[in-house]
């Protein structure tokens, strides 16, 4: 293992994995802190996916340190702390406190911090984070229910979260390239700064920052700043040239889509799929019971599974979601449907389904939990940020594509299976 990463949420971890695979690293995503005896997968990079973004600070630190210890034991040479490209955090944490704990555990005294991801319109200029043309605190993120971002100045934001001090490597330096960035970081470290927010506006900046961070024990940021890391390992001859890093085993079996996301993109993808594939709607208003809902869906699947992928969806437009939430309460409505979909996933696998697309972040978490999947080998991207993965766990070989609700083009559900046919 060359790179060991700790990600503060599940879909963020997948995003980082995809970036590393694109750079030529064979990458596996591990779900949750691995058991201390769990054997490390055969991969160039391993990303441990935590749910620590909004967890209590102490818990986020403890889980991150446990993940670090496991990655260290597995032989990782460099470590990456992945957070959101909108720097989702509060004055209490968790980015600062977790980074402090990792810096201390590694004894490195310093880490760069760069959430920039120009492809997704996240740029950092003079330490200020922009989302598209807007400053972070005017981008809508100021209204986030859990991590409202009311200050775009990341030097200030991170300063409020750490016991250390924070410096800046400004655009004018970054634009001069690798040597200038490296020297600036060395100077900041010598001045006693624990972190450097590093400006980045283009992918070329990210590549230069990645190269300048060669040899750093810890790097922190969004998945964008990982763009330059594979090349550091390749230059040293540590990355095998043989084979496709995105290659996954070929698996025979049925195909299905499970949708629990009510996001706009998923609703459009379902609209498109209805014209091409058999679709069953899970109606929790009519059957407000997870086991009974799953039984109804699986009875339909028994008559519908064949050559074509089948689709089972709970997804609904806002008025229907509101109706169910009024009837059952917001949380119960969500967990009932997540439970039903997880049961359907297990039932489909018992019926021979081996290629499964799941739409929805929470929905994916519940399916993966039910199936006992502990790690995902990352394969080809279907659409940006959503790769096919090979699930490793207790069950039979399974290809899984876990889609965050708003990701993917309108034809995503068809395209996913088309890609597998090569
Ligand atoms: P996304 O990635 O789009 O946010 P999630 O799976 O994370 O999707 O969240 C969607 C939530 O909505 C889940 O808790 C799911 O169970 C719930 N849900 C799905 N369908 C309905 C529905 N018809 N009514 C109410 N809640 C629903």
Image: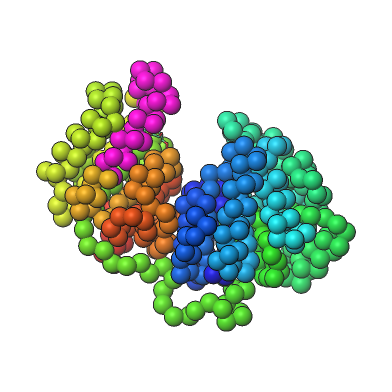
Image: magenta residue range: 321-345
| 177 w.r.t. 327: above or below | below
Residue drawn at x 19%, y 40% is 298
Residue drawn at x 32%, y 58% is 399
The foreground one among 141 and 176 is 141
Residue 100 as seen in the image, left or right of residue 298: right
The image position of residue 370, as x and y in percent, is: 35, 44
Q: Quadrant of residue 163?
A: top right
Q: Is residue 289 visible?
A: yes
Answer with the quadrant where ligand 1 appears in the image: top left
The foreground one among 119 and 420 is 420
Q: Quadrant of the C terminus?
A: bottom left
Q: Is residue 163 magenta?
A: no
Residue drawn at x 19%, y 34% is 296
Residue 115 as seen in the image, left or right of residue 293: right
Q: Is residue 136 visible?
A: no
Q: Residue furthest top?
A: 327
The image position of residue 390, as x and y in percent, is: 36, 60
Q: Main secondary structure of the magenta part?
A: helix
Q: Residue furthest right?
A: 191
The image position of residue 209, as x and y in percent, is: 68, 65
Residue 181 as seen in the image, left or right of residue 398: right
Residue drawn at x 43%, y 40% is 362
Residue 417 as seen in the image, left or right of residue 75: left
The foreground one among 225 and 353 is 353
The image position of residue 117, as x and y in percent, is: 60, 54
Q: Quadrant of the N terminus?
A: bottom right
Q: Is residue 328 magenta?
A: yes
């Amino acid at each position: 293992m060359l790179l060991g990463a700790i990600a503060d949420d599940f879909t963020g971890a997948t995003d980082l994995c995809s970036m590393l695979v694109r750079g030529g690293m064979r990458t596996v995503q591990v779900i949750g802190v691995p058991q201390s005896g769990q054997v490390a997968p055969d991969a160039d990079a391993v990303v441990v996916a935590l749910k620590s973004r909004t967890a209590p600070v102490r818990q986020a630190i403890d889980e991150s340190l446990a993940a670090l210890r496991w990655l260290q034991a597995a032989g990782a040479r460099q470590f990456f702390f992945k957070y959101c490209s909108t720097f989702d955090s509060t004055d209490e944490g968790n980015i600062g406190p977790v980074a402090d704990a990792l810096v201390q555990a590694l004894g490195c005294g310093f880490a760069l911090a760069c959430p920039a991801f120009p492809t997704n319109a996240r740029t950092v200029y003079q330490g200020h984070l922009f989302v598209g043309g807007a400053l972070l605190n005017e981008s809508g993120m100021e209204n986030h229910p859990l991590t409202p971002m009311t200050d775009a100045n990341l030097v200030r934001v991170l300063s409020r979260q750490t016991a250390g001090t924070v410096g800046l490597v400004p655009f004018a330096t970054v634009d001069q390239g690798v040597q200038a960035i490296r020297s600036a970081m060395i100077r900041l470290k010598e001045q006693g700064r624990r972190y450097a927010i590093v400006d980045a506006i283009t992918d070329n900046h990210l590549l230069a920052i990645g190269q300048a961070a060669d040899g750093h024990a810890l790097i922190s940021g969004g998945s964008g700043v990982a763009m330059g890391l594979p090349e550091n390992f390749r230059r040293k001859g540590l990355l095998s040239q043989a084979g496709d890093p995105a290659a996954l085993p070929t698996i025979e079996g049925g195909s299905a889509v499970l949708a629990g996301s009510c996001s706009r993109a998923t609703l459009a993808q379902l609209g498109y799929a209805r014209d091409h594939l058999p679709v069953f709607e899970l109606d929790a208003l009519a059957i407000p019971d997870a086991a009974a809902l799953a039984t109804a869906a699986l009875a339909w699947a028994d008559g519908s599974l064949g050559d074509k992928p089948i689709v089972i969806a709970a997804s609904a437009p806002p008025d229907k979601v509101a109706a169910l939430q009024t009837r059952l309460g917001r949380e119960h409505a969500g967990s009932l449907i997540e439970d039903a979909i997880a049961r359907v996933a297990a039932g489909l696998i018992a019926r021979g389904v081996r290629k499964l697309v799941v739409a929805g972040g929470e929905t994916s978490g519940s399916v993966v939990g039910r199936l006992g999947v502990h790690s995902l080998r990352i394969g080809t991207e279907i659409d940006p940020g959503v790769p096919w993965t090979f699930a490793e766990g207790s069950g039979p070989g399974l290809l899984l594509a876990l889609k965050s609700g708003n990701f993917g083009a309108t034809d995503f559900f068809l395209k996913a299976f088309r890609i597998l046919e090569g």
